[in-house]
Amino acid sequence: MNGATPQQIYVLSQGCAANFGDGEKIARALQAQHPNAEILFEIPDRAMEAPSGLRPLSKTTFYLNVCTVKGNAGAIKLLRSVHESFPQAAVYITGCAPKDFVAEATRVWSGIQFTSLHEIELRQPAKVLSTGPRPARVLRESPYVGIVNIEEGCLDACAFCSTHLVKGKLKSFEAGAIVEQVQKLVGDGCLEIQLSGQDCACYGFDFGTNLAELVQNILVHVPGNYKLRLGMGNPRHVLGYQEALLDCFTDERVYQFIHLPVQSGSDRVLKLMNRRHSVADYRQLAESFAKRFPLFTLSTDLIVGHPGETPEDFEETLQLLKETRPTVCNITRFVARPGTPAAKLDGQIPDALKHERSARLFEAFQQIALENNRKWVGSQCTVVTEKCGHRPGTTIARNTAYRPVALAGEFPAGQRLQVRIEGAEPFALTASAL
């Protein structure tokens, strides 16, 4: 019917890049199923209002692609927000939704439905009749960043983690299909390609290849002026091909950045966590990357207050942080996830002690990050602009090591600039365009 209000479908993702990559896959599948609908990635500021005006609630559908890795609170907050603003909307929940979250979410809103990326993709119609124009671009949240999930699941069963309960064992995606996705995204204007997954480091182990071989495959078959950012990987998997992976970072199309979550500096705690790498494994990798690339960005994760963590274990974690000097460090206080082995362990740590330990780690990390960033001051480098800065009149960009650079001035996203680094803060560099 001419003049009819189109259906609006919101796909709202949380958590890691892999989850956002799944969210974009969900959006593209929904686009194929509902070619006349508006697919949106951000909730409108006011109830019932969308970018093109007032819309009836009955034509609004939400897909909440949630993350519960650090507990249910963030996902429940998102659900409540949607429920309060859109009480008549259809709501589907997908993502990392273990059984305890399903029960809690249903108590908040009994009318919600649970689904998965796989179920959504299975709904693909054999033929779609459309009265509207076909989209000219690959549907995604950012016009300049493309997320390509290279695998799902993992080869581990960490005691604190609920993600593997939802995602299951490793399933790597075929290299040719990944290369084709990258080609399409680069051809569609993406300047940054994020290779993502629950554990990118074990990519291809299920059919005899690895992450380094995949990266080289992409670099050979996808020419262009873009950069790859490699996703999170458990340290133990990298050890078997670390030299080949190091070689990948010599190509200027690969950000000199790696995310290797160690989680603890105590081998005793790592065993309690059922992490199958040692502190020495992580230390060796950190040293190898720092030796080969002095300005490389090492990112890691640390959990404080895991059940059984003693004061001595914590001091070992603090010491490892000081030795390996990561520029990015996600410090998390342990949260017991129902259904995980860690939730049943003796020696649960009081919240007050968790806060004290995390504060000490954060203080030490801030100083390390600041000292690492000061090494860039006075240098010139190429950056790609990303978004408006938090401070008025500034723009956030990324340099070759994926470090955020706060530029003086307002520049459109997706612009390449030569800049001079003039200052350093713990979490960003400051610069001016040349």
Image: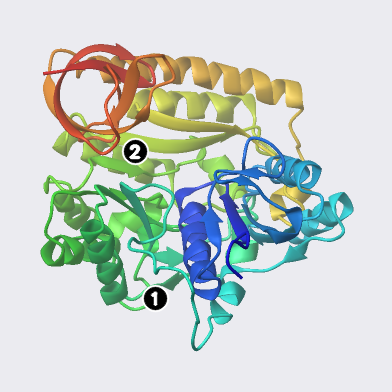
> As rendered, which of 315 and 187 lies closer to the eye?
187
Q: Can residue 154 be seen in the rendering of this structure?
A: no
Q: Which mark is residue 206?
A: 1
Residue 25: x, y in percent?
47, 64
Amino acid carrying mark 2 in the image = Arg
Labels 2 and 1 touching (C-beta < 8 A):
no
Of the numbered discs 2 and 1, the one sitting upstream in the chain is: 1
What's the residue type where badge 1 is placed? Asp
Residue sitting at 23 percent across and 43 percent down? 255
Q: Which residue is pictured at 20% across the width and 47% down the height? A: 254
Element on which disc 1 rests:
loop
Measured as percent of width and height from the top left, residue 118 is found at 57, 74
| Mark 2 crowdedness (10 Å alpha carbons): few <14, some 14-19, many ≥20 | some
Q: Is residue 363 above or below residue 259?
A: above
Residue 196 sits above or below residue 301 on the image: below
Depth check, mark 2 against mark 1: the one in front is: 1
Q: Can you see residue 365? A: yes
Residue with the mark numbered 2: 283
Q: Residues within 10 Å of mark 1 (few under 14, many from 20)?
A: some
Disc 2 versus disc 1: distance between alpha carbons? 27 Å
Instruction: Give whichever of 425, 367 is nearer the camera.
Output: 425
- Label placed on residue 340: none
Q: For residue 329, which quarter of the picture?
A: top left
* On-image quarter of the C terminus: top left
Q: Secondary structure at mark 2?
A: helix
